[in-house]
Image (tube, rainbow, N blue to C red):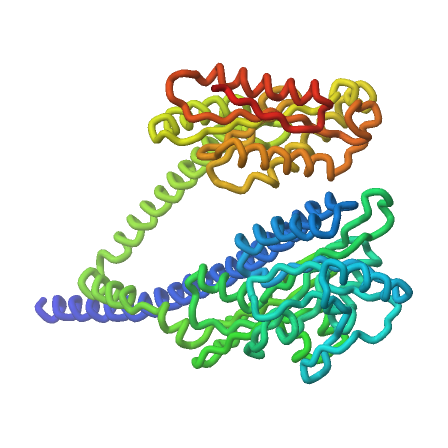
Amino acid sequence: MQNSVGRSALIVLILGLLLSGISGITVYQLKQDVSQSRISADMKVLSLQFSEELRLATEAVHGLAAGMATDYGLPLSEAEQHFHYLSESVLNRHEKIQSVYWTPIIRSSDRKSAEQNWQAYFPDFQIYELTDSGVAVPARQRSDHFPVLFVSSELKERNNRGFDLASDSVLLQGIRDAVVSGRMTISGPVSTRGYGKTSSSDADRLVLLIQPVFDPEAEDNISGLLSAFISVRHLMKEVLSASKLTGLHVQLTDQNILKDSVEADALLFRQLPASAKVMDMAQSFLINVLPGYHWLLTVTPSEEFMNERKSDLAYVVTLTVLILTAIAASYVRMSERRQLDLEQVSDARYQELRKSNKELVKKSQTDDLTGIANRHTFDHSFDQEWKRTRREHQSLSLVLFDLDDFDSFNQHKGRLRGDECLRNIAEAIRSAVNRPGDLLARYGGDQFVLLLPNTPDSGASMLARQCCQLVESIAIPHHQSSAAEVVTISAGVCSLIPDGGIDQYQMMEYVAQAMRQAKQKGKNRVESIDPV
């Protein structure tokens, strides 16, 4: 009997040890699979973050080009002032953008007269290029020159005014693609010499975003190029820093350049940690920079990166539980599995309910047609900001926009075209609203309202004029308008510090009155009213 009991205990002990070993190996493999899946997901997120940062840069250049399109016919000094106003705003918001250039297109036969005209404003102006040693010399004759006329840069070491972008073969290819296609292109990588820095690491490569700007009086003619140098190293370091992923081998190459050149010429960025690569964990992501332009991002974890994410706790706990509860292990596992299934079902239902609630809240706050805030959201925000600015004794501004002769537009174009027009107008105005606290809403019909907390009359009026210019620049044809040949808007502005003398409803009446004054004075303009 004792032997039987001893044998039974020995059998239980042996079974427990066997189960412990088998369970330990199984848990280790599961832990490895989960860890690898998590690392793969982290690297995927890294590629998406990089794509998003690049998209924001291209949108900024698009917006800047749209602003420059309104400068046609302005004197050179005013055009340069407007360029600096727009470009410095972009540089302040996007540190990855190193320099912004405005470059006219000069035919070889017009070079001499163009240099003489610009020397009236810039006495030392000449179209030049750089030698291999970095010395500036007059540019050689080419069929077309692309000299830098206006420049804004975060790097103040040198002024590139007059530099002929066509003298660089890599940049010239991107410029030709932009001129032929009439849309934004991106150049291959170039070193920083001559483009804003006097010295730099070889790892710092620049690419040039090139956006053609068309002559508003002859839409088939390109009046110039709006271009921006982006530091790929700065962009990638920014994304890596935000992701908090260290110890990754990262390589970024230009696939378009790689087709016809060696890898060194196509290399945009490379990061090589001291620890060796874990090659079976390498992942490559194709970044669609622009239509027809592709970069390849290759991310490989290092051994140090993988070791930091290992944990022995699962094995210790598993081994201890299996040794102490060899007989009850099956029951515990089944209980835990049932509990896990219940939690997963509960979590799935909770996530589904949460998603539905978010969609309902968003739908209740958003205008179905334009995608911006609706009247209800505006009324609520207006009430909150009114109370806050009154409490803090801060200024509050309203801008009311109304489309000019929109009824006739609907009559001649139809309601579907009218709805499309409203969406385009809303998108144009929204592109000019940058502060988180500002709110653009559809007030009703063809009216939009802009709520600007902590904004004086001068700032609100300037933003309103900018919105009017943006709407006019998208050039939606409207031949029945009494203001212009394209769709335009009129705007009324009212600014005050809530102090009890005027309530919210009276302020709305004032801003509506200012808008009506803009209509009466010829439309496509901004009028401000002083409620005091």
Quarter assignment of residue 434? top right
User: Horizontally, is 146 left or right of 321 in the view?
Assistant: right
User: Could you say where residue 484 lies in the image, as x and y percent from the top left?
Assistant: 79, 29
Report the residue that reaches farthest toward the left. Answer: 2
Question: In the figure, 389 relative to 201: above or below?
Answer: above
The front one of 470 and 500 is 500
Horizontal and vertical percent position of residue 185: 73, 59
Q: Pick the residue in front: 249 or 197.
A: 197
The residue lying at 77 percent from left, 75 percent from top is 260
Q: Which residue is drawn at 37% across and 68% down?
A: 309
**Quarter of the image that includes the N terminus:** bottom left
As drawn, 307 above or below 109: below
Direction from residue 261 to residue 243 in the image, left or right: left
Q: Which residue is drawn at 73% across and 23% down?
A: 522
Tell me the residue at 80%/18% (across/down). 411
Please tell me in which quadrant of the rendered image residue 446 appears. top right
| Placement of 455 over or under 307, stated as above or below | above
422, 6: nearer the viewer: 422
Query: Which residue, as the protein is rendered here, is positioned at the far bottom?
Result: 133
- Looking at the image, residue 455 sits to the left or right of residue 107; the answer is left
Is 155 situated left or right of 307 in this image? right
**Number of callouts:** 0
Residue 195 percent coordinates (x, y): 64, 70
Say if 140 sits above or below 116 in the image: below
- Residue 7 drawn at (x, y percent): 16, 70
